[in-house]
Amino acid sequence: RSLLPLAVAFGCGMAVATFGGRSSQLGAGESSSAASVFSGTTTSRNTDSRNVRGIPQKNDKPTSAAIDTSTLSTFDELVTGANRRRTQSATCSNDFSHDAGPGSPWDRLSSFEESIVKTGLRSALKLNLYDSDSFQADSVRSVDLDDPPKAEMLEYLDKGGPKPERYARAWVMHLQGEADHIMEYRVGPIDASAGTYGTVTALTKEGSIPGSAYKLTWSQQSAAKKVIKSFAGHPSVSEFLTQAFGSTSTIEHSFHENDYDADASRYVNVAYRRRTSLLDNILAYPLPFEFRVDMEPANDSSQWRIVNVLYRHEYFATSLDFIDALQKGEVTIQPTLPFSSNPFWQTLDGRTTDRPDNDFPPAVNVQPAKRYTVVGGQVEWLGWSFHVKNRARTAMIIHDVRFMGELIAYELSLQELQAIYTGRQPYMANKYLFDSVFNYGSLNRQLKAGVDCPVEATYFDNICVFEHDAGIPLWRKDHQGNKFYAGAKNTKLVVRSVFPVGNYDYLVEAKFNPDGAIDMGFAATGQLFMSHYDKSEEAFGTKVHDEALANVHAHFAAFKVDL
């Protein structure tokens, strides 16, 4: 019965369905018309702009539901017919929308608004944002909309209250002075028409978040690479790299860049890998050589040191110890095996060309007409309505989820993605990632129609929306030997976003179901992050190539559900 109200989501305004007297009395030999068990009324929508929900007002008058149900024989036909009725009039096209499209308090900051915020931060905090090669250059790590307080939004949406003002939340790396640290600020109210940013308010205590808790700035990365290059360029180390791994022009380093100790000291773990072409995933060609760069003091790279050098199973406390051992001939050099003559072994290239019937195109679903609407970030589908966007730090966020006008969830959003790796070698054993530090919501790429989402999907803001046939009945019942059949087609509205973080591409999506259920989850795809293989590593992963181990790891996602 929970399906039935959905079937009469038609007309201008909120649809109300009631069950006919025989709704629960279907039996053998009775009419198979699902529509015949319904009667319904609709309430005309008050045109007062404050009635943003189409909530019945005291002067609203009920009108009869003008849909011919006599010719509809299935639940799906009823829903289709109701939707067709709903789209016949232009005034009904946004029945369940409210403040849809640009101008919604939830819309992400425009580029102009972001520039206003950064100007305000620079002016109010006296930031040095220009000298990118200097450790004294501050860094605005992220700027995003600070979503309006829930109480203000509900007052605005449901009671016609004032439209909430626009504020931004900014994360700033302060590098001026002896100790780098992160601060979080609230900036606003932002007035784009006047070009003003309001005030800048600190949300964290100065020094409470050390700079080492965040990923490296460009200047820090550049300085770390110079230290690594200097070490690799030492004659003894250069000769070692050539003997152990071949031409030094084909090897590169990768570093895990957000490591820090409990005492807030900064360091990065560095591992060497082989690259054979520009198309390579260098993470698939690990080499048995790694070390750590201690980056203290943070603002003076001349004092940074290379420590914890590991070559295969030989450990050296410092770079000087390693160089001394090389010069004394105390390092046993064992050349690595060639990985493969095929540089694309770790990709999907060429994997499917020899399969039978591969020349035929795959199956596709085609929807003749869309039963959903998207205006700005406002989406509507068969009685469902909600606002969706991507935010810089944590990607897709859905607000104000309503079913037939009733608030189901105020917010559904991804809050954090985490990956924890295992390994015997320090580089992998210490690899734990909280991916929001990379602002993965800002890493979205243009979605690929036909791969990421169906071709006929609606695309906006690196989000796609489409209706999906689940290929299995939502509900069915065959009564008394095929004398009567009733069933409901299972279609879902899918809202999806895809974004890359390092070697992974993550997909986060919400599925809205016709029975009132919502499914939300994520998936991880991409390329393996591998370490060098030897027998001692077998407990920590699976050997996937001659000297490559796919390390055991786990992915976690945290979602916020605010009802």
Image (cartoon, helix red, strand yellow):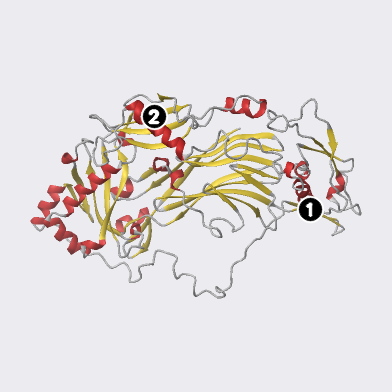
Question: Is disc 1 surrounded by few (<14), some (14 to 19) or many (20+) residues within 10 Å?
Answer: some
Q: Residue furthest left?
A: 328
Q: Quadrant of residue 125?
A: top left
The residue pinned by badge 2 equals 120
Tag 1: amino acid: Glu
Q: Position of residue 534 (x, y in %)?
A: 30, 59
Mark whose residue sits in front, 1 or 2:
2
- Quarter containing the N terminus: top right
Say if residue 14 shows up in the picture: yes
* Along the viewing direction, whichever of 391 and 522 lies nearer the viewer: 391
Direction from residue 108 to residue 142 in the image, left or right:
left
The residue pinned by badge 1 equals 77
Q: Residue at x 34, y 57 (%)?
A: 283
Q: Residue at x 70, y 46 (%)?
A: 514
Q: What SS does tag 2 mark?
A: helix
Instruction: Name above or below for residue 176 compared with residue 351.
Output: above
Q: Position of residue 274 (x, y in %)?
A: 28, 61
